Amino acid sequence: MPYVNIRITREGATSEQKAALIQGVTQLLVDILGKNPATTVVTIDEVDTDNWGVGGETITARRKRGA
């Protein structure tokens, strides 16, 4: 039973986009590894940009300075 966790920043991904991610990742596991889609689990965690950091600063700060 494959388990895939996708983490994205909370910036307005629509329900349709998230459904497409779940379907696409599931299909990729079917196509590449031959996994059973009925037992493939995909979760999406949305993280506030204040709680996600790269290079020692938050994504919020990076976006404010245009990085």
Image: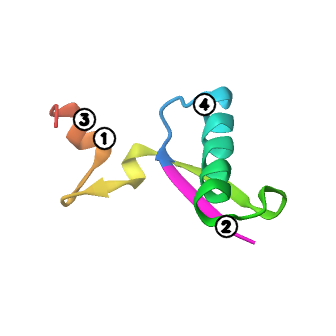
Between marks 1 and 2, how big is the CA–CA gap? 29 Å
- The part of the chain drawn in magenta is 1-7
Left or right: residue 40 versus residue 62 is right
Badge 4 amino acid:
Gln
* Residue pictured at 59% horizontal, 60% vertical: 5
Badge 1 amino acid:
Thr
Mostly what secondary structure, the magenta segment?
A: strand
Badge 3 amino acid:
Arg
Image x and y of residue 33, in percent: 62, 66
Residue 7 higher or lower than 18, as above or below: below
Between marks 4 and 1, how big is the CA–CA gap? 22 Å
Asked whether the beta carbons under mark 3 and mark 2 sit within 8 Å of each other, the answer is no
Q: Secondary structure at mark 2?
A: strand
Image x and y of residue 67, in percent: 16, 37
Magenta segment: does it hold 2? yes
* Residue pictured at 64% horizontal, 35% vertical: 20
Image x and y of residue 63, in percent: 24, 35
* Residue pictured at 78% horizontal, 56% vertical: 37
Asked whether the beta carbons under mark 4 and mark 1 sit within 8 Å of each other, the answer is no
The residue tagged 4 is 17
Question: Which quadrant of the view contains residue 64?
Answer: top left
The residue tagged 2 is 3
Asked whether the beta carbons under mark 3 and mark 1 sit within 8 Å of each other, the answer is yes
Q: Which mark, residue 63?
A: 3
Closer to the chain start, of discs 4 and 1, is 4
The residue tagged 1 is 60
